[in-house]
Amino acid sequence: MYFQPELETMTPQDLRALQTQRLAKLVAYVYERIPHYRKAFDAAGVKPEDIKSLEDITKLPFTKKQDLRDAYPFGMFAVPNDEVVRIHCSSGTTGTATVVGYTENDLQNWGDCFGRGIIAAGGSRKSIVQVSYGYGLFTGGLGAHRGVESVGAVALPMSSGNTKRQVQLMHDFGTDILCCTPSYALLIADTAIEEGYDPAHDFPLSAGIMGAEPYSEGMRAEIQDKLGIRVHDIYGLSEIMGPGVACECERQNGLHVCEDQFIVEIVDPATLEPVPDGQWGEVVITTLVKECSPLVRYRTRDISRIVPGTCECGRTFRRIDRITGRTDDMLIIRGVNVFPSQIEEVITTFPEIATHYQIVLSNKGPLDHVQLQVETVPEFPFDEIRKLQDIKKRLGAELKSNLQVQVEIKIVEPKTIERSEGKAHRVIDLRGEGK
Amino acid sequence: MIDQLTVFLANEKGRLASACEVIAAAHINMHALFLADTQDFGVARIFCDTPHKAAEVLVEQGYRATVIPVIGIEVPNHPGGLAELLGYLDAQNINIEYGYCFSLNDERAIDVLKVSDPHAEEKLAATSYTLVNPEDIYALD
């Protein structure tokens, strides 16, 4: 089932023609309306009329997060406030917040993107969709909400938090689709089990649309098993739009990019040169139809790749692979590049270890020290110290062979690691503090 | 078999006190406590009244706690009492996971053993050793 088959299954030739026409229009639009782009294009010696084909996109300069910060708050808006109907912005925890405005058309387009994900997840007008992403300036809650409304399904606007109530309504109302971060889905599942339910069998829930943080295949499998659902990965970022830029179909093999609305490129983060399909690199996105906050070649800092080939589902939009991390999430430990998702991938192969974990980086002497805090599952025979030490040893050896980095394993008491209602904070970096 | 309460604790200041406070708040009396510790965590093994209830309140408070069946054997409180028992178990090829001892009074001591052999209790019952009944140590659940 498709939500917008005329777009989702259009031929590559038609899509190319649509993208080319929209790209040319966008370039003229931003050049005329946004001072930053006029300056940047002039500096790069490129005029809107130079962009005649899709390949010409490489002539355009990249947009960086700092450019959005420099324009704080409304410097990157292409329309006056009487056309803006909503504003979202990033939390600003790592610097000045980035502010993104939406016109009514922008919201409708966003809703269409998320709506495609709902239909791909088996949803329909009849489905009850529980939105347990946070509502507010964060794009997750309201983005998913608009998607539910676009489809005409039943929105249950829970926001995040109050987990016991989430479980109760999920059970009482018979929620069909759950939308939240994967780490929160796991907390909801564990809470349901603690409350005495077997959600995989007791709840009619059939699918989850989960994103806003990277997660491993192992974590997906755990959510799917505990809740008895199919989990669809969804991608988005607050600078472009919240969840909906790309979403998995029922094949769960890569996320179809909404290419009628976005051009996606994968570039080598060091050289900024495009890489061939299949190769990993930084995702770069150009918005084709956004009116308020259009972006040209925005460097997302997310790491993915184009999944080569076509998808059996019939959608012709190209797919990106699951996001393995962000260029700024990447930990450089003793000179080795490590993504938290790689550590998670190893943890999920140990059934004795719960999926909640925390990575603590510190300096012990001249070298980086990595401590991984984990909990055993409740059934683990912790009475025998030998078994606890054995699991520490095996997990450490497995991490060492996968990451080439020595990791100290610390088994902690349950609930020592903070449970997340939104995005999980997996890494505590204390390096530099002791110096 | 007798029921031993086992609690997993981070090896940090105040954790044992805090676990004991939870048990105290539930008005459960402890009779013996043994600690096995490593650098980053410890395991507290406890004889207390109503051990299942104690485990339940600890789990409710977020502790990793459970009840483990162990064997209690009464031995004469004189030199060689324990050595003789261990010699017997060794001869029977019964492996000991861990164990500890405490004296009840001048005459009697109790050896507590966690063994991997599921028939260990039967084998010991057939000897002249006296197995300790749970009600001799703590109030049952």
Image: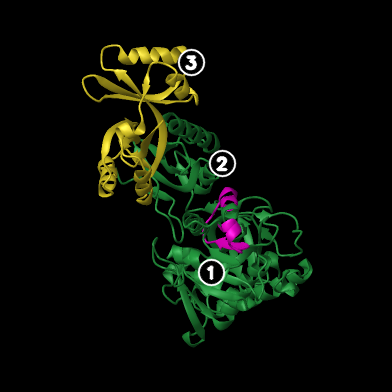
Mark 3 highlights which residue?
B93
SS label for mark 2:
loop
Compared across the picture, whether A320 is left or right of A145 comes to: right
Q: Residues within 10 Å of mark 1 (few under 14, many from 20)?
A: few
Q: Is residue A159 visible?
A: yes
Q: Residue A349, which numbered label?
A: 2
Image colour for chain B is yellow
Compared across the picture, whether A200 is left or right of A15 comes to: left
> In this view of the protein, which residue sits in the foreground, A162 or B137?
B137
Three-letter amino acid code at the position of disc 1: Asp
Residue at the (43%, 20%) spot, across then down: B124
> In this view of the protein, which residue sits in the foreground, A101 or A107?
A107
**B70 is higher (above) or lower (below) than A138:** above
Three-letter amino acid code at the position of disc 3: Asn
Q: Residue A172, which numbered label?
A: 1
Alpha carbons under labels 2 and 1: distance apart:
34 Å
Direction bottom: furthest residue: A82
Q: Residues within 10 Å of mark 2 (few under 14, many from 20)?
A: some
2 vs 1, front mark: 1
- CB of mark 2 within 8 Å of CB of mark 3? no
Q: Position of residue A269 (x, y in %)?
A: 55, 53
Q: Position of residue A101 (x, y in %)?
A: 49, 77
**Residues indicated by labels 1 and 3 sit on the same polypeptide chain:** no
Chain of the residue displaying label 1: A
Q: Tell me which label, 2 or 1, sits earlier in the chain.
A: 1
Q: Which chain is green?
A: A
Three-letter amino acid code at the position of disc 2: Thr
Alpha carbons under labels 1 and 3: distance apart:
56 Å
SS label for mark 3:
loop
Magenta stretch? Answer: A199-222
> In this view of the protein, which residue sits in the foreground, A7 or A183?
A183
